[in-house]
Every structure is written in structure tokens, then in C-alpha cells.
């Protein structure tokens, strides 16, 4: 599948292009897993300086590893545990500028320095989280947070209508 995101002048436009690419790429006849697998590949391919992109999906009261791109990862995360479980419990995006200084961080590889976790929420109910790691400290700012929240909203609309 060839997905082009075209020109963009800043991060806002970059994330708009990515959200549009998600809209074109996701076939509403597919179930969540193939769609999220392609989205993790899309984000990992187009975002600069990221080492891991993937989803954890709420299943039986914990977060279960879903489609991802990167090195093998922990398969279950309890609500409130780690950065993913914190974002899931709060139902709010969590950004960690330097994982070494984060008391509630679950290490999955030796290279990650910063992380952003965006919850996927449908009608006030948590479906899972989008987790992105970077080898650089302070990789994710407010513009990334806004852009990725837009992408998360697009995914929820398309995959869990
Ligand atoms: N660091 C995450 C665990 C998942 S990995 O980053 C893939 C956390 O603290 O929840």
C-alpha cells in the first residue's frame, strides 16, 4: 500500500496530513487489529525520531499489547501502572520528557528517553492507548500532543463507530 502524506509547513499540518492518511487507509469493513496495525506502521514510518509506536487495548480490566512497530514489549499493563496505565486511568494524555526521572515508567527497551501516551476514548469509555517512544529526551511537545489527540479521535471515529 502506498500512502503519501504530501507537503506540510509545520507540525499542525503534518498531523492533519497524517489524520487524512488514516482516513484514506482505514477500511471500515476491517476490524480494529488490521486498521491499528497499519496506523502504527504509518506513524512509525512518517514520524521523526521515534523508536516504538503501538497500541495497548483495554481488555478484561488491563491494557493488552496490540499492534505495534518496534522491539518486543510488555504484554500486560495494569491501570495506573507505568505511563500507559497512568494515561489510561486518568483518560488524559501523558508526556514524559525524560523516562529516567519518571518514577512510574515501565522500561521496554534500552533506547527510549521520552514518551507520549494518548488515550483512545469513545463516548467517555476507554478503549486503549496509543503509545509512542523516542530515543531523544523532550521529543514530544504540546503540538505533538494536540496532533496525536486529533489522530486518536480520528481512529476512534473510524474504527469504533
Ligand atoms: N513505557 C511504557 C510501557 C510500554 S513500552 O514503552 C512499549 C509505560 O511505562 O507504560
Image (cartoon, rainbow, N blue to C red):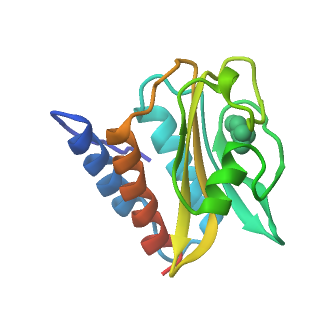
On screen, residue 124 above or below 154? below
* Horizontal and vertical percent position of residue 37: 60, 52
Say above or below: 155 vs 75. below
Q: Which residue is found at the position 40% from the left and 45% from the top?
A: 145
Q: Residue at x 44, y 47 (%)?
A: 1
- Residue 138 in picture, x, y percent from top left: 47, 24
Residue positioned 24% across, 43% down in the render: 12
- Counting labels gives 0
Q: Is residue 72 left or right of residue 26?
A: right
> Residue 54, located in which quarter of the rendered image?
top right
Pick whichever, 47 or 132, lies toward us.
132
Q: Is residue 87 left or right of residue 27?
A: right
Q: Is residue 89 left or right of residue 21?
A: right
Q: Position of residue 151 (x, y in %)?
A: 40, 56
Q: Quadrant of ligand 1?
A: top right
Q: Is residue 82 above or below residue 121?
A: above
Please state which of residues 64 and 92 is positioned toward the viewer in this rendering: 92
76 relative to 110, above or below:
below
Q: x and y percent of residue 158 in the render?
A: 44, 72
Amino acid at each position: 500500500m502506498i500512502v503519501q502524506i504530501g507537503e506540510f509547513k509545520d507540525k499542525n499540518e503534518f498531523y492533519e496530513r497524517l489524520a487524512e492518511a488514516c482516513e484514506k487507509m482505514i477500511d471500515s469493513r476491517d476490524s480494529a487489529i488490521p486498521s491499528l496495525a497499519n496506523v502504527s506502521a504509518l506513524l512509525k514510518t512518517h514520524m521523526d525520531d521515534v523508536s516504538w509506536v503501538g497500541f495497548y487495548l483495554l481488555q478484561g480490566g488491563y491494557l493488552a499489547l496490540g499492534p505495534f512497530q518496534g522491539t518486543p514489549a510488555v504484554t500486560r499493563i495494569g491501570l495506573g501502572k507505568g505511563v500507559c496505565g497512568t494515561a489510561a486511568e486518568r483518560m488524559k494524555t501523558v508526556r514524559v520528557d525524560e523516562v529516567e526521572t519518571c518514577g512510574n515508567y515501565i522500561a521496554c527497551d534500552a533506547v527510549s528517553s521520552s514518551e507520549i501516551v494518548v488515550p483512545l476514548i469513545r463516548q467517555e469509555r476507554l478503549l486503549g492507548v496509543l503509545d509512542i517512544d523516542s530515543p531523544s529526551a523532550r521529543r514530544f511537545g504540546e503540538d505533538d500532543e494536540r496532533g496525536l489527540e486529533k489522530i486518536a479521535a480520528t481512529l476512534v471515529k473510524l474504527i469504533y463507530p
